[in-house]
Image (cartoon, rainbow, N blue to C red):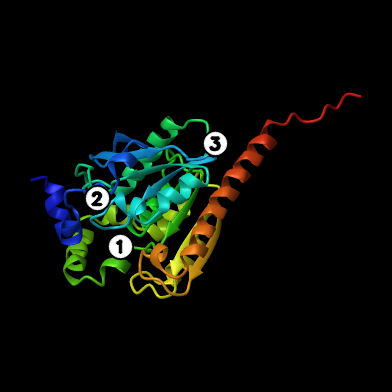
Amino acid sequence: MNIYKILKWPFFGRFMVKWRNPLSPEQKKEWQPISTKSKSGGVIKGLFAKTKTIQEKGTIVLGHPMGKEAKGYFIKNGYTDLLRENGFNTVVFDINGFGESSNGNFSYHEDIVAIGIKASELTPDIPIGYHGVSLGGQMATIAFADINHKYNFAIVESAATTLEDFWIKFPMAYKVLTLFNILLPKYRKQVRMIDRIKEATNLKSLLLIYSKSDEWVPVEMGRRFKENSPVETELWTVDNAKHALIMKSDHRDDYAKKIIDYFNGSVKSKKERAIEGDRIPPSNFK
């Protein structure tokens, strides 16, 4: 058995299971299987689908929360349909050790960097955005500090500020994490999300989404991320939704609108900046 799979067991063991594809045979025809090697050591598996509209606004990479559904989370809960119906190509992927991706180490942020590079190769001439929920969101705050990441704008949702802040609610996992922190102090610093967000590069904007009733990740964590973010950042909240389940809450419609409005505004702003950069300064000659 892979050594990292053993080490991950206290944290993710019950979620690292054989993946079940929620797509029907007819739906599968719309999706292209993709894969890429990550510096985490894992082979990252994903799916790519083109927009359902004539206009191709951008490509959005979706980073899943901790769970057996892995990349299927976004398909089953309507995110991919929402994005594709509004002009966005969509990439879903499995973080290493989840779904169809092979096991690598704990550097899940490397998977996010790798799949972003893959997305930019698939659609090289349009903006690349990111939306990560819980695990897929908090690891992205580290990925954004990597000069090689390809994301122009991003949504980070229901993300913990540190690993300790999240795992303290799970006694066994927290004890193992404490041991890891003692043995690997440099790595602990490397994956401390609330500090790494300060080093975000290439991003033009960031949208943070939290639920006021989230028992695992309170809104205060979003406020701390916003305070530490070096880019234009908005914190948007809903009143009542369980952790990583806003799409299934009473706020579903407002939430979906917020996501699309943010991505629409982001691709428009990028296009305007590109046009501005291409303008030739007026001549000084009369």
In this rendering, is residue 165 above or below 259?
below
Residue at the far top in the pictured view:
285
Q: Which residue is labeled 1 in the image?
A: 163
> Disc 1 or 3, which lies upstream in sequence?
3
Structural distance between the alpha carbons of marks 1 and 3: 42 Å
What kind of element bears circle 1? helix
Structural distance between the alpha carbons of marks 3 and 2: 40 Å
- Identify the disc placed on residue 54: 3
In this rendering, is residue 134 above or below 47?
below
Q: Amino acid at mark 3?
A: Ile
Horizontal placement of 264 versus 13: left or right? right
Query: Image point 41% across, 68% down: which residue?
Result: 249
What kind of element bears circle 3? loop
> Percent from the top left, x then y, of residue 272?
66, 41
- Identify the disc placed on residue 106: 2
- Identify the disc placed on residue 59: none
Q: Amino acid at mark 2?
A: Phe
